[in-house]
Image (cartoon, helix red, strand yellow):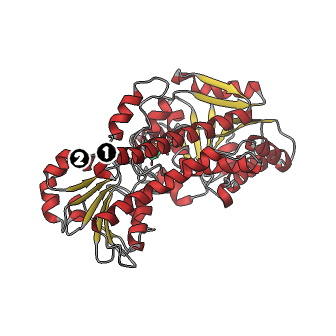
Amino acid sequence: MKNIVVIGVGYVGLPMAACFADFGNLVTCVDINGPRIEGLKAGVMPIFEPGLEEITRRNAHAGRLRFTTSYPDALNDPAAPADMVFICVGTPSGVDGEADLRYVRAAAESIAEIADHPIIIINKSTVPVGTGDWVADIVRGKQPKPIPFAVVSNPEFLREGQAVTDFINPDRVVLGSLDASAAQQVAQLYLPLRAPIVVTDLRTAEMIKYASNAFLATKISFINEIANICEALGADVKEVAVGMGYDKRIGRAFLDAGLGYGGSCFPKDVKALAHMANVQGRHPQLLESVMQINSDQRKSIVRKVRALIGDAGKPQPLAGQTVGILGLAFKANTDDTRESQPVEIAQMLEADGALVKAYDPVAMESAGKVLKDVKMCEDAYETAAGCDALILATEWNEFKNLDFRRIKNSMNTPVMVDGRNMYDPEVMRRHGFVYRGVGRGYADA
Ligand code: UDX
């Protein structure tokens, strides 16, 4: 049992803190966001994550999970001085895609100034290669007096919407440090998971994270490029993915063509890795293509809508048209709309003059902060009513078995653009829709 401090209770920090508490550790979460901490003390979750509320409430009730805004109370509790502190703060994209490390710096400085005993500092946030050394320099420079510490890189591989299950069932745990003993102490935390533990140096651990996310993003851009070629050649990309996926060297996962990748990770991590390469004079030509394909994929959806209901002769080809969007989150089972493809598509439709309606089971509040003129609806049916085209943009389960007769009859023109290939083209055409998917053959061109 260890005394653990987690700095930053967001999409990574909170699920990790709750799971470590569930293993029997004493975990104290620190965040500068007072309302978020007060909410957690009252059992209110700051993020939508399946399973998180139960595990958080149960462990908080058991006294294993605590929340505070005070670094001293968290790090130097006389009854439970912290053995290790995880930095789980955001590392958003900065200028030219470089990761903005201001929050990591602030956390490192606070730890240095406040921790009054030896401690292990663990970078959980996705940070550029070399950040571990940078954190160590910051701590050494800020400590009022030299106190032993070690820095460990422990990148996370959690998918939003599956963070709790991904934490409990990792394919691997990655640890990097120049201090073998510190790495081993952190490895002990993960023993209950019985997962492979890769122990390496700081920079290699940091690169494993970037290379993993960049590869997954590459897989997605690859299948989207294949989808675009399938439309020209009359092949069905969904079947192509099935046929490819049986090859163990390829694997079926992350071969779903659609709107391209969004979210707070792939876009920023691919940009950050490309930036690191460019700074070193190594041209990241593959990563630049991955980003370009991804950007084009969102535009291709708007192009399909324009082709189906637009007027190329108008300065705004969709002026006077109403388009409905089903789903605003960057993927199902999350309320996160950061770098969300549906949000960007809504903005492009509005720029083309369309009136946009939208519905998402949980992400309308966050999307609404950006989409001021979009009419937010109560459900899919209200969204579809009166539309000239409907876009399936997020693969929420509740969109899988809609009453399509009711949807079609409520629309001005029964045009369905299925951005996630959720529906069977034949079924939709039998319902009377003019249907377009992504890479499902000639008809989708
Ligand atoms: C990702 C990584 O999967 C995770 O390991 C890392 O720790 C954080 O970044 P996340 O961004 O939460 O997780 O979502 P993920 O499920 O990976 O999907 C990312 C984006 O790719 C979503 O927009 C999703 O819709 C899209 N996607 C995913 C596809 O378009 N096709 C696919 O086949 C898979």
285 relative to 375 in the view: left or right? right
Quick one: 175 or 84, which is closer to the camera? 175
Disc 1 residue type?
A: Arg
Q: Secondary structure at mark 1?
A: loop
Query: Residue 445 at what x, y percent from top left?
Result: 34, 53
Q: Is residue 245 above or below residue 13?
A: above
86 relative to 60 in the view: left or right? right
78 relative to 263 in the view: left or right? right
- Quadrant for the N terminus in the image: top right
Q: Residues within 10 Å of mark 2 (few under 14, many from 20)?
A: many
* Residue at image point 60% right, 46% down: 287
Q: Secondary structure at mark 2?
A: helix
Query: Residue 86 at what x, y percent from top left?
Result: 64, 41
Q: Is residue 126 above or below residue 388?
A: above
Quick one: 209 or 103, which is closer to the camera? 209
Query: Does any portion of residue 61 appear in the rendered image?
Result: no
Q: Which residue is mark 1?
A: 440
Query: Does any portion of residue 426 appear in the rendered image?
Result: yes
Q: Is mark 1 within 8 Å of ligand 1?
A: no
